[in-house]
C-alpha cells in the first residue's frame, strides 16, 4: 500500500516541543491531553452524532472537573464511560458502511511509518480506537488532525453530505507501563466482541509487540 500523508496538520497553540521523555499536557477547554515525544497512545475518535446530548453534557462536565489534574486515573475512568456509550452503536453509524469502513481503514494504514507506528486498530460503527507510537518529530494532535481531516472529506464525498463528520474532540491515554500497553492492545482487539459484533473484519494488530499481547481478557480496563 502506498504511504502518503493525509491532510496538513495545523500549528497547535499552548505547548512547546517537549524534550524526549517529557510529558506535555494540552488543554483545549474540554479535556486535557497528555503527550510525550515518541510516546505510545491509546486514542479514540468518534462520529459527531455518536453520543446523545445528555450524555455529552455529563461527560463534558466530568472532563472540566479533571482539567489540569497531573494524574490520569480520573481521565481513564472518564474514557471507560465514553467507551460504554460508544459501544451501544448510537447515531447514524456511517462507519458500518463498507465503502466508508474501507476508506478509514486504508487511511489509518497509510500513516503507519510516516507519522506513527501502528500497533492495534479497529474501525467500529461509530468510533475508531487505536494504539499508536508517535514517531519522533510528530505530535499526537497533528496525527489526529491529519487522519480526521482526510477521512471526513472523503466520507462526506462518498455520502454526498456536508458538515462535520467527526466530533472535534478526541480521547487519549498515554501508555507508560507494560501492563498498560497490554491492556490497551487487548481492549482494541476485543472491542468488536465486547460490543456484540460477530465476525467483524475491521480490526487488527501490527508488529511483534502487539501480536504477543493479543487474545487477552475482553473485559480488560485501561
Image (cartoon, helix red, strand yellow):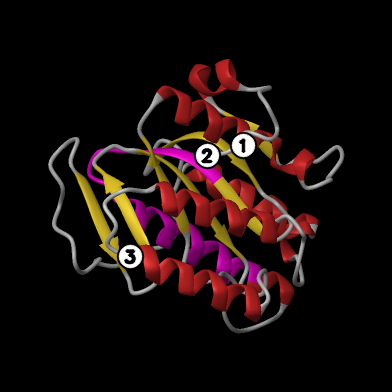
Up-down relation of residue 23 to residue 209 (above or below): below
Q: Position of residue 132 (x, y in %)?
A: 45, 39
Q: Residue furthest bottom?
A: 162
Q: Please rate how many residues cluster around mark 1, counting C-alpha atoms within 10 Å: few if below 14, some from 14 to 19, many from 20.
A: many
Q: Which residue is at the front of the view, 118 or 150? A: 118
Q: Which mark is residue 220?
A: none
Q: Please rate how many residues cluster around mark 2, counting C-alpha atoms within 10 Å: few if below 14, some from 14 to 19, many from 20.
A: many
Q: Name the quadrant containing residue 161.
A: bottom right
Is residue 213 found left or right of 93 in the rendered image?
left
Q: Residue furthest right?
A: 198
Tag 2's secondary structure?
A: loop
The residue segment tinted magenta is: 130-155
Residue at point 51% right, 16% down? 208
> Do callouts 1 and 3 mark residues in contact (Cβ within 8 Å)?
no
Q: Nearer the viewer, mark 1 or mark 3?
A: 3
Q: Nearer the viewer, mark 1 or mark 2?
A: 2
- Identify the mark nearer the N-term, 2 or 3: 3
Tag 3's secondary structure?
A: loop
Residue at point 71% right, 59% down? 100
| Spatial CA span between label 1 and label 3 | 25 Å
Tag 1's secondary structure?
A: helix
Q: Position of residue 177 (x, y in %)?
A: 38, 27
Q: Which mark is residue 187?
A: 1
Q: Position of residue 22 (x, y in %)?
A: 18, 41
Q: Which residue is mark 2?
A: 222
As for residue 45 lying within the magenta part, the answer is no
Q: Which quadrant is home to the N terminus?
A: top right
> Do callouts 1 and 2 mark residues in contact (Cβ within 8 Å)?
yes
Residue at point 75% right, 65% down? 93
Q: Which mark is residue 67?
A: 3
Q: Would you say the magenta stretch is mainly helix, strand or loop? A: helix
Amino acid at each position: 500500500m502506498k504511504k502518503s500523508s493525509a491532510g496538513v496538520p495545523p500549528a497547535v497553540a499552548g505547548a512547546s516541543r517537549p524534550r524526549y521523555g517529557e510529558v506535555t499536557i494540552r488543554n483545549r477547554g474540554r479535556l486535557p491531553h497528555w503527550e510525550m515525544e515518541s510516546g505510545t497512545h491509546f486514542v479514540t475518535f468518534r462520529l459527531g452524532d455518536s453520543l446523545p446530548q445528555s450524555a455529552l453534557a455529563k461527560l463534558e462536565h466530568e472532563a472540566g472537573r479533571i482539567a489540569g489534574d497531573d494524574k490520569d486515573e480520573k481521565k481513564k475512568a472518564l474514557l471507560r464511560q465514553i467507551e460504554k456509550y460508544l459501544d451501544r452503536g448510537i447515531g447514524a453509524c456511517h462507519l458500518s458502511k463498507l465503502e466508508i469502513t474501507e476508506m478509514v481503514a486504508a487511511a489509518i494504514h497509510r500513516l503507519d511509518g510516516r507519522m506513527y507506528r501502528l500497533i492495534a486498530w479497529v474501525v467500529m460503527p461509530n468510533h475508531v480506537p487505536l494504539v499508536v507510537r508517535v514517531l519522533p518529530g510528530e505530535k499526537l494532535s497533528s496525527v489526529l488532525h491529519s487522519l480526521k481531516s482526510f477521512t471526513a472529506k472523503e466520507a462526506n464525498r462518498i455520502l454526498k453530505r456536508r458538515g462535520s463528520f467527526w466530533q472535534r474532540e478526541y480521547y487519549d491515554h498515554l501508555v507508560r507501563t507494560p501492563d498498560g500497553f497490554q491492556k490497551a492492545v487487548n481492549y482494541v482487539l476485543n472491542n468488536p466482541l465486547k460490543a456484540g459484533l460477530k465476525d467483524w473484519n475491521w480490526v487488527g494488530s501490527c508488529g511483534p509487540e502487539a501480536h504477543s499481547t493479543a487474545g487477552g481478557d475482553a473485559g480488560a480496563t485501561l
